[in-house]
Image (cartoon, rainbow, N blue to C red):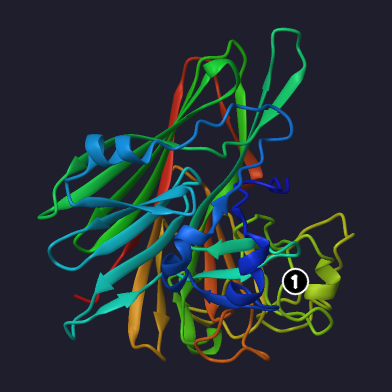
Amino acid sequence: MASSTSLFCSNFFIPKSTRNTLLPSQFCLPFSSYIQYNHQYKRFFPLPKVASVPYQPINFDYLQQEFNGHGVTFEEVGGSCMAKMELKNGSLATILIPSGLITSYKAPMWHGGKVELLHTAVSEGEFGDAIIQGGVSLNFNFQVNDDDGDKVSWSPTNWVLHNIKGNAEESIQVELINKGPDSKIGLKYIVTLEKDGLGSELEISNSNSSPLQMTGSILIHLTVSTPEATYAIGLERSNYYIRPPFESEFILSPPSKDKGLGQTWKSSVKQLFPGWGTNNQNNEVERSQSDSEDTIGEETDSYKQLKERISLVYTDAPRSFTLIDRGRRNSVLVGRNGFDETYLFSPGSSGIESYSKYAYICVGQAAVLQPIVLSSQNVWKGGQYLHNPNL
């Protein structure tokens, strides 16, 4: 089952007077550099197309008064709010509210410095809007039968800051909440920053009289020197399905020969990935977007180099595996709980410059091949974590 589209739209409206000076054609910069322009942007939030939940404007003064402390500070960014979590040992993470997008995770290293582990970029959209992509994002769709027996589809977009726990000495936990149509779907998104890791957990409660079905993923963009220098360790003997790249407003699209920068996941998969579906083990198995059957394989490489373009959903992978970047001489352990599927995407190294916009690996904790079904009055928990072993 394919993941839903048009979720968590993160478009910014840019006044005409500043479009040419701030975001020229094919403009792209790291999110941290974009913050300096925050007073010149206005945030725009489209409502979900099917089941809408009213968007409540952010009261920045209230957030400062109610939640400031615990190692968290707030900064206004173009009408939205950036919550910055920082520990005394140097670990730092930033979250955008209300989108829930984690734009940065800086981890302390053995050499005494800090390294950014997430890959986030800002580029100009078709209509002069600034598009934020990458980081850690939620990409979920919920379906449930209403009182008339009709299916209602809903995707969470606007998250509200509910609570902050912890302190700057040990760990910080930020809790965001969201309620579905008629407040019968309760969602908690809990982001936890620790000295050696960053966790994102989703808690779902179903108050409907009928079962709730969830599909989608938590997508993580990890920055690397280049995919060619990056290896996945611990996936051997896991079965995988070759699938089209996930669709999400936050996922970064690799460059296309015809379109160049700015190509989106809504473009033709064939155009983005000519002959995509090639089995990276022997480069012999191919399929097109229209094929009805999935290509299935078994991972045989214990030290899997990610230089080729791949889009794989593992169905029985270990609960954690390690990504090593030999170019930056660091590694990160990626783990999951609750989810049965792991997504691994590499844009490949062909035509991609080192340390460029497309020098990243995307990992997802997913429910796309098999949806998660939550019965009435039950609660489900699942999430992902990044562990920094480089201290």
Disc 1 marks a residue whose amino acid type is Gln
- Give the total of numbered labels: 1
Quadrant in which residue 111 is drawn: bottom left
355 left or right of 88 in image: right
Residue under the image location 48 percent in, 48 percent down: 79
Residue beneath disc 1? 263
Residue under the image location 49 percent in, 35 percent down: 57
Whether residue 28 appears in this view of the structure is yes
The N terminus - image quarter:
top right
244 left or right of 102 in image: right
Quadrant in which residue 343 is drawn: bottom right
270 left or right of 255 in image: right
Label 1 environment density (alpha carbons within 10 Å; few <14, some 14–19, many ≥20): some
Residue 106 coordinates in the image, percent (x, y)? 31, 69
Residue 6 coordinates in the image, percent (x, y)? 70, 48
Disc 1 is placed on an element classified as: loop
Residue under the image location 35 percent in, 65 percent down: 105
Whether residue 239 appears in this view of the structure is no
Which one is in front, 328 or 22?
Answer: 22
Most extreme residue toward the front is: 17
